[in-house]
Amino acid sequence: MHVELYEKTEPLGSVIHFLTVILKSLGWNEESDTLTMDVGCGAGNVTTKWILPVFPNVKKMIALDHLPGMIQQARANHSHPKVEFHVANFEDSSSVEQWKGQISKLVSIHVFNWFKDQRNVSRPFTISCNQEGVDSWVPESHFKRYDSSHYKTIAKEIGFSIVFCENEMKVNKLPSEKYAKDLYYSISALAPYVPTNLKEEFKEDLFQHVLRNGGINADGTQVHRASTLELVLRKE
C-alpha cells in the first residue's frame, strides 16, 4: 500500500454512513467505554477524524496497523491524546495479548478481507473483547466469494451474537479520474513493488482494469463498486 496517497483519500461514502448512521442508530455513541480498538488504522486519518467521534465518551483508543510506515505517518500527522498507535500484526494473536479482555468495542474497516485465514484470525477478536464487548468489521470479501452466512457462522462459532448484518453492492461516487487512480493505487498490495519509472503506467493499467469491471457509470461518473458485508457483533 502507498502510505502518502492512502492518507490523502477520504473514506468511501458507504463507510461514513456505516460509522455515522448505522453505529449511531445502534447506540454506540451513547455508551461510556474505557478502551476501544481500531484494527487496520492505516495512516490514522480515518481513526481520528471518523472513528474516534463515534465514541465521544471513550477514555482510550488503541489503533493497530501491521505496516510500520502507516503507524509512523499516523503518529506524525494524526496524533490525539485519546489514541495510541501501535505496529501489530492482528493475524498473530500474541500481538493483542496485552489488551486481553479489556476491549469493549472493536472496529475494523475494509481490513478483514485482507487476512489470509479469516476463520482463525477471528480468535484475536475473542481474546481482545471483554465479556460485553462489541466488535464490527466491514469486509469486502471478493476472492473466495463468501456470503453473509459464512461470516455469521464464524461469528457464532467464536462466541458472538449478530447485532446487525447487511450484505449488498455498495456503489460510491468518486470525485475525479485522478482521485480514482490514486485511490486504487494506494490500496494495491503491489504498489510497494512497482519500480518508480513504471508507477504511472501501473496506475493507468490498474485504473483501466477497474473501469472494465464496473468502475464507471453509463454517464461517465467514476465509482468504487464492491460487494460489502457490514457486521456488528456482540460477545456472548
Image (tube, grey):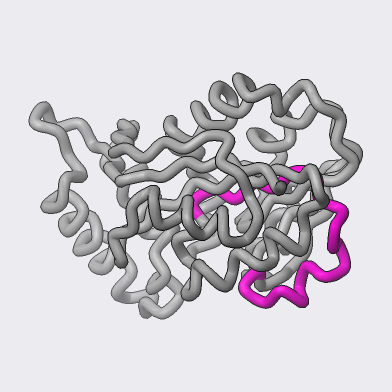
Say which of 171 and 217 sits in front: 171
Q: Seen in the image, is 93 located left or right of residue 156?
A: right
Image point (38%, 75%), residue name:
196
Above or below, 222 against 130 in this view is: above
Image quadrant assignment for residue 207: bottom left
Image point (71%, 74%), residue name:
93
Residues in magenta, as a range: 90-110
Say which of 35 and 76 sits in front: 35
Answer whether residue 105 is magenta in the image: yes
User: Please, which residue is most extreme toward the left here?
Assistant: 218
Image location (x, y in percent) of residue 12: 44, 37
Q: Seen in the image, is 152 located left or right of residue 87?
A: left
Image quadrant assignment for residue 178: top left
Q: How many marks?
A: 0
Image location (x, y in percent) of residue 131: 81, 49
Q: Residue 182: in sight, yes or no? A: no
Image location (x, y in percent) of residue 49: 67, 34
Q: Residue 101: in sight, yes or no? A: yes
Answer whether residue 174 is magenta in the image: no
Image point (62%, 61%), residue name:
158
Image point (63%, 50%), residue name:
160
Q: Seen in the image, is 188 located left or right of residue 9?
A: left
Image location (x, y in percent) of residue 110: 49, 51
